[in-house]
Image (cartoon, helix red, strand yellow):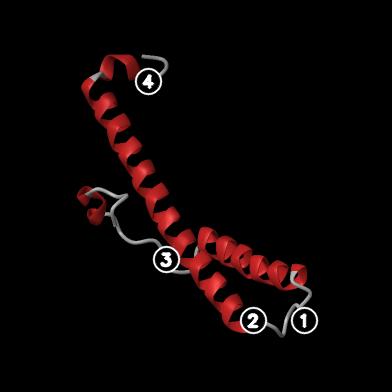
């Protein structure tokens, strides 16, 4: 994947069925239905191959966007924990 660095490979992959995949897959399917409606074709019966294609593209786009978001959050967590480890005097427990 060109938009993730090599250090992202150490993270576990997200599940195939996740919120981003389902949401963008549904958006792709609805886009195909809207295309059929605007072209005055039968909405559910025409262009089934296009409906499957748009759903699949949305599903994989959602999967890779979730993977990218998990990498960004892991990177921020690692940087924050490194800062806390280097500056313990700023993070003393209350009541000490």
Q: CA distance from mark 2 to mark 3?
A: 29 Å
Q: Position of residue 53 (x, y in %)?
A: 53, 75
Kindly report which numbered mark, 4 or 3, lies closer to the viewer in this rendering. 3
Q: CA distance from mark 2 to mark 1?
A: 9 Å
- Please say if 80 is above or below 32: above
Q: Which of pointers 3 and 1 lies earlier in the amino acid sequence?
A: 3
Q: CA distance from mark 4 to mark 3?
A: 37 Å
Residue at 54% in and 60% down: 19
Q: Which residue is mark 3?
A: 15
Q: Is residue 17 left or right of residue 9?
A: right
Screen quadrant of the N terminus = bottom left
Residue at 49% in and 60% down: 62
Which label number is shown at residue 47?
2
Residue at 58% in and 77% down: 50
Which label number is shown at residue 93?
4
Q: Which of pointers 4 and 1 lies earlier in the amino acid sequence?
A: 1
Q: Is residue 71 left or right of residue 19?
A: left
Q: Position of residue 39 (x, y in %)?
A: 74, 71
Q: CA distance from mark 4 to mark 1?
A: 65 Å
Which label number is shown at residue 52?
none
- Please say if 6 is above or below 35: above
Q: Which residue is mark 1?
A: 42
SS state under label 3: loop
Contact, mark 4 vs mark 2 (Cβ under 8 Å): no
Residue at 30% in and 59% down: 12
Q: Is residue 19 left or right of residue 72?
A: right
Q: CA distance from mark 4 to mark 2?
A: 62 Å
Q: CA distance from mark 3 to mark 1?
A: 35 Å
């Amino acid at each position: 994947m060109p938009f993730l660095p090599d250090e992202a490979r150490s993270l576990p992959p997200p599940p195939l069925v996740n919120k981003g995949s389902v949401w963008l897959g549904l958006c792709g399917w609805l886009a195909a239905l809207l295309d059929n409606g605007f072209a005055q074709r039968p909405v559910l019966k025409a262009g089934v191959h296009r409906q499957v294609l748009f759903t699949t593209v949305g599903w994989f786009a959602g999967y890779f966007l979730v993977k990218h978001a998990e990498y960004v959050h892991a990177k921020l967590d690692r940087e924050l924990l490194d800062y806390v480890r280097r500056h313990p005097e700023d993070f003393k427990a209350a009541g000490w």
